[in-house]
């Protein structure tokens, strides 16, 4: 094996190993629980989820008729 | 360890590792082989290189021949696959990324005559009417027919001649053409 | 403000926008100036390609100087200044803290504009650094990097003083962008890359990373905010969005050498970049799925919002250009399209159809809210959208269409080289036409922006913030 290939393989293994370790730590440390809550961050009391904004060229209030997607039932309309 | 310090760590780590891999590692593998030889770069060639960079030639011309079997560079007579020492340690590199015009890595071997280059630089359409290469008249001087006796003007076709005048290459044109003619893979660099 | 204090004062959206007003407006207005200047240079360069003798006696206007100045002014002027303004506003909103170091940022902005001006004169005068995407002299780049570092300091302060418990995905992208770009700018300015092919490697590591680690994160951060915000629906899968971020961070960094396929560099470096470029498909598809699932079924709401017209167009362009880029990195495809106009069009789909259109969309949302004014003409907004959208589509189709034929012609030794040039000329003319469409769109946009600060209309044409204004006057 050339030196170049050796450096490559060893460093890749180190990096991938490191990344995997970090990911596994994050997973078992509960970093990924309730992750869907993060999607509500752009909304707040003044501009809540469930209301369209910036409808300049017309009116579209059909959000209430929409099927919420998986996980959205818990979040739609909730206040921060 | 706070959560966002992991984010910061990840941001720096992903960047620095790749930076090392793509900029420092190549230095380690390539630098010595390129700095070691003694290159034939007289003053005119280095000046010509600067003018090549100044006029932005790389935006239409590449200077890297691809290996035989990849593309048709070899079949077009553009030369053998370029190697690091062909660039003769002149900076900035001008490998180029466009072939609006032909590759120039071996142009000195294809067009060894100075007059052809002078004409091409002054008015490219004098050589090939379909060319879209820009003209570079400011590299030349237009003087009266009788001025500078002993120096012949460019042999321009009818429609580009200026009556009563002749066009002479200035120092800059001479440097640039010396540089272009030096782009010859046989003599490229290594002593 | 004492960084140590654990003040729990909650800023309202209006307060945050009010504090952001001067800084963000200044950065975006500067950006729009450079957009107009860069567009003018673009038109000159494009016309000169099929009319090479036009203005052919002026050395300072030769294609080889105008073309790189166009690139540098739209990249470090328009896209970076506007991108920075948009980014700071987004961070203020998402961290619920006013933009920090506002005074310093204004000073930095002024210096940045001056540096661009001086750098522009230097390039036209023949003092280009001669490296693609780095034609501004090192002095200009170092000054710009220092200005960005001031903004990065503001970003880190905002992060430390935030009033939110969780960081939204847009914040991840923006923090990363403000850390990555100064590093890129500094490393590329170091004089340690002193042999030609090594410098070429650094060149393309830098240029591709400028796209993927500065502009792409700002663009994606904007998309992840404005799509949910306008539609009133949260992002489809937040977990997926985080995966997308780490995918970008991991793989994008290694792409650079795909610009040197077939070139005089050791093959295994190139192969690494090709692999990374293909791996990018993962985060790109993740982002596309997320956006699509959030938007699907809300077409009417997208059409009604100028912001989303531009943002969704841009987001779709991002998916397209990234998948196309992954394909271009494959050696078999690269053999054909390398060195052709196909690649130039690809760059424009990325920087224009994605980044620029995204910035337009962001401006249409941000400007009324920080100025408390209305756009004075709905019709002009529509003209802006259609001119620029159709313009860039013509650009892409024309040059990528002929670029493929140009490439096939080049790898066929029986096709005379001059034929590969003449076949492109009609399409270069089409590109100029598309350029005029886009330029007109930019003039309209600039006019709309100017009217926001000069003789703003009393009668609202676009009732965005009118209710808020009425409230303020009522109280």
Image (cartoon, rainbow, N blue to C red):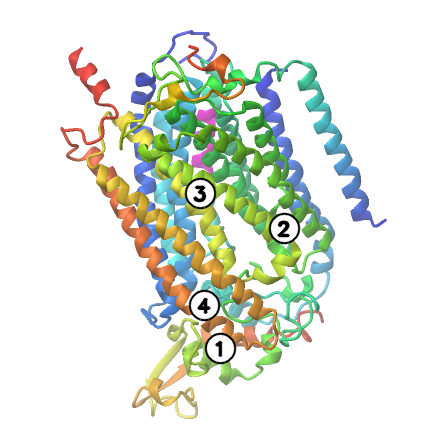
Q: Is residue A77 above or below residue C396?
A: above
Q: Which residue is mark 1?
A: B174
The span shown in magenta is: C142-155
Give the dominant element type of the magenta stretch: helix, strand or loop.
Answer: helix
Q: Which residue is mark 3?
A: C354
x%, y% of residue B116? 50, 83
Checking the image for residue C257, the label placed there is 2
Q: CA distance from mark 2 to mark 1?
A: 35 Å
Q: Quadrant of the C terminus of chain C?
A: top left
Q: Which residue is mark 4?
A: C424
Decide if residue C296 is on the left or right side of residue C195: left
Chain ID at mark 4? C
Contact between labelled residues 3 and 4, with CB atoms less than 8 Å apart: no
Q: Nearer the viewer, mark 2 or mark 3?
A: 3
Q: Nearer the viewer, mark 2 or mark 1?
A: 2
Establish whether labels 3 and 1 are both on one chain. Answer: no
x%, y% of residue B158? 36, 90
x%, y% of residue B55? 45, 65
Q: Residue at x 34, y 48 (%)?
A: C388
């Amino acid at each position: 094996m050339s030196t170049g290939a050796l450096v490559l393989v060893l460093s890749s293994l180190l990096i991938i190993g490191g990344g995997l370790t970090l990911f596994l730590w994050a997973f078992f440390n509960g970093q990924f629980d309730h992750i869907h809550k993060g999607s509500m961050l752009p909304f707040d009391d003044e501009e809540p989820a469930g209301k369209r904004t910036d409808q300049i060229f017309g009116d579209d209030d059909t959000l209430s008729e929409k099927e919420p997607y998986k996980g959205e039932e818990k979040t739609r309309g909730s206040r921060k | 360890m706070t959560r966002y310090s992991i984010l910061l760590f990840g941001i720096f780590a992903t960047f620095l590792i790749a930076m090392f891999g793509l900029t420092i590692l190549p230095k380690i593998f390539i630098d010595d082989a390129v700095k070691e030889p003694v290159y034939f770069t007289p003053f005119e060639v280095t000046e010509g290189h600067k003018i090549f960079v100044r006029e932005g030639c790389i935006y239409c011309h590449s200077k890297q021949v691809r290996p035989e079997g990849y593309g048709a560079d070899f079949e077009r007579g553009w030369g053998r696959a370029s190697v690091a020492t062909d660039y003769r340690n002149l900076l900035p590199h001008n490998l180029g990324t466009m072939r609006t015009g032909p590759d120039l890595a071996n142009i000195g071997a294809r067009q060894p005559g100075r007059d052809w280059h002078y004409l091409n630089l002054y008015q490219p359409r004098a050589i090939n009417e379909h060319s879209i290469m820009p003209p570079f008249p400011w590299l030349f001087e237009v003087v009266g027919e009788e001025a500078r006796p002993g120096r012949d003007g460019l042999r321009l076709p009818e429609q580009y001649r200026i009556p009563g005048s002749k066009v002479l290459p200035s120092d800059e044109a001479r440097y640039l053409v010396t540089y272009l003619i030096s782009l010859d893979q046989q003599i490229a660099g290594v002593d | 403000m004492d960084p140590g204090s654990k003040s729990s004062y909650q800023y309202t959206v209006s307060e945050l926008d009010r504090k952001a007003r001067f800084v963000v407006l200044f950065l975006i207005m500067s950006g729009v100036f450079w957009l107009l200047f860069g567009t003018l240079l673009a038109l000159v360069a494009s016309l000169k390609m099929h009319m090479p003798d036009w203005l052919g006696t002026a050395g300072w206007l030769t294609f080889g100087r105008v073309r790189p100045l166009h690139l540098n002014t739209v990249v470090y002027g328009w896209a970076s200044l506007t991108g920075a303004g948009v980014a700071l506003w987004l961070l203020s909103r998402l961290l619920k803290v006013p933009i920090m170091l506002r005074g310093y940022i204004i000073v930095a902005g002024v210096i940045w504009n001056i540096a661009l001006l001086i750098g522009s004169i230097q390039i036209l005068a023949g003092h280009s650094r001669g490296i693609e995407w780095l034609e501004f002299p090192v002095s200009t780049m170092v000054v710009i990097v220092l200005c960005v570092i001031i903004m990065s300091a503001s970003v880190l302060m905002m992060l430390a003083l935030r009033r939110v418990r969780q960081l939204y995905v847009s914040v991840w992208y923006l923090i990363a962008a403000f850390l990555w770009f100064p590093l890129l700018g500094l490393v590329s300015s170091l004089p340690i890359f002193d042999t030609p092919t090594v410098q070429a490697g650094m060149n393309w590591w830098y240029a591709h990373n400028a796209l993927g680690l500065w502009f792409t994160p700002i663009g994606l951060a904007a998309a992840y905010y404005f799509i949910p915000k306008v539609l009133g629906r949260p992002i489809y899968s937040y977990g997926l969005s985080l995966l997308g971020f780490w995918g970008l961070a991991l793989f994008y960094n290694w792409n650079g050498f795909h610009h040197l396929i077939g070139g005089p560099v050791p093959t295994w470096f190139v192969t690494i970049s090709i692999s990374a470029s293909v791996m990018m498909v993962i985060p790109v598809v993740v982002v596309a799925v997320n956006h699509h699932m959030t938007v699907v079924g809300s077409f009417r709401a997208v059409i009604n919002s100028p912001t989303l017209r531009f943002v969704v167009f841009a987001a779709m362009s991002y998916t397209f250009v990234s998948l196309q880029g992954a394909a271009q990195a494959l050696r078999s495809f690269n053999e054909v399209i390398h060195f052709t106009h196909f690649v130039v069009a690809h760059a424009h789909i990325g920087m224009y159809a994605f980044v620029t259109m995204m910035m337009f969309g962001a401006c249409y949302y941000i400007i009324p809210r920080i100025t408390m004014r209305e756009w004075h003409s709905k019709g002009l907004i529509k003209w802006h959208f259609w001119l620029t959208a159709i313009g860039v589509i013509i650009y892409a189709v024309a040059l990528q269409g002929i670029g493929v034929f140009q490439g096939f012609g080049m790898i066929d030794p029986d096709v005379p080289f001059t034929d590969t040039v003449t076949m492109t000329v009609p399409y270069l003319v089409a590109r100029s036409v598309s350029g005029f469409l886009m330029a007109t769109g930019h003039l309209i946009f600039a006019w709309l922006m100017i009217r926001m600060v000069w003789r703003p209309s009393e009668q609202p044409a676009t009732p965005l913030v009118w209710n808020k204004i009425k409230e303020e006057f009522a109280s």
